[in-house]
Amino acid sequence: MPSVAADAMLPKQLESELRRVSLPGCDVRYLHLRTGVGPPIVLVHTLRTQLDYFVPLVQRLGRGVDIVAPDLPGHGLSTAPRVEYTATYFTDAIAQFLESCDLKDAVLVGESIGGSVGLGLAARKNPRLARVIAINPYDYGRGGGIRRSSMVANVLFTMMLWPVVGEIVIRSGTKGILRKVLEGGVHDPHNVPGELVDELWTSGSLPGHTRAFLSLCRQWKTWITARGSYSDIEMPVTLIYGDQDWSRPDDREANRRALRSARYLTLDACGHFASLDQPERIATVIREEVARVKAA
């Protein structure tokens, strides 16, 4: 089991707020920062990142809020059970996490696969959620939307889908390649912190994490299937896209049709990794949604 060690990405004042919780088949690391009252803000990160990804956003949210941010199974310092990493698996895991932490009236802010997880929980009418903010939900793209990141990503993630070859490709990656893939998801490459790349590279070498990520990549169809439940959503949803997200106009329009009552926002100068490109703007939206929960 990985230990909660000093983290180069997390500010020192946040390291003491790291916790662990045991879920069925998985041990999850999470951040619980209590600096205020009101509904908990649950941050669910993107594919191949971890809770450290949200440091710029947490810093801009400031004090006076209750923030909970887990590492998804197979990511960060959470363990990587031997399962198929489907959309349903991740959605079940976050439902179990909300239950284990006894979170109520939560505002779930999910990005990429985290956004799709949030929408999936909303479609299930999860009673622990008050509303969902889905940022660049990852529910499109043949072979997985990450292939749209760059030419390098297209080649790598196409090869990962091949039997035998995929294992060789993923194990022969470098930190430089990881940075290139991340830079393909932002408007400004300078918004990818070097410390974050270091943390992702280190956690990616933990037992089972390579296998977990390969499974996630190969289960791309399950994220597209999951969007079929969006029309069942009744709770308030804010749907946010970066103007340079990997999704295409028809992908976004399909979600707008399924989520007709959702609040819909587009962020300028923003790629797929929106909390790196536009953390201040996202923090503003979160504060607005938290205020709506308090007023309800």
Image: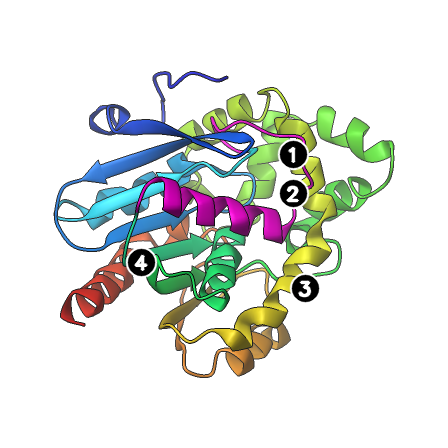
Which of the pair 191/70 is nearer the observer? 70
Secondary structure state at the residue bearing disc 4: strand
Residue type for callout 1: Ala
* Residue 288, image x, y percentages: 22, 66
Residue 137 is situated, as x and y percent measured from the top left of the image, at 52, 61
Instruction: Estimate the spatial distance between the alpha carbons at disc 2 and disc 3, rounded to whole Å.
Output: 14 Å
Residue 66 shown left or right of residue 36 in the figure: right
Mark 4–mark 2 distance (CA, rounded to whole Å): 24 Å
Q: Are marks 1 and 4 in contact (CB under 8 Å)?
A: no
Q: Is 212 on the left-hand or right-hand side of 120?
A: right
Left or right, residue 149 beside residue 45: right
Q: Which residue is mark 2?
A: 85
Q: Where is mark 3, residue-wise?
A: 225
Residue position for label 1: 212
Circles 1 and 2: CB atoms closer than 8 Å: yes
Q: Nearer the viewer, residue 278 or 27?
A: 27
Task: Describe the element under mark 3 as helix, strand or loop.
Answer: helix
- In the rendered image, residue 53, in percent from the top left (x then y), is placed at 41, 39
Is residue 74 visible in the rendered structure shown here?
Answer: yes
Q: Residue at x 51, y 55 (%)?
A: 117
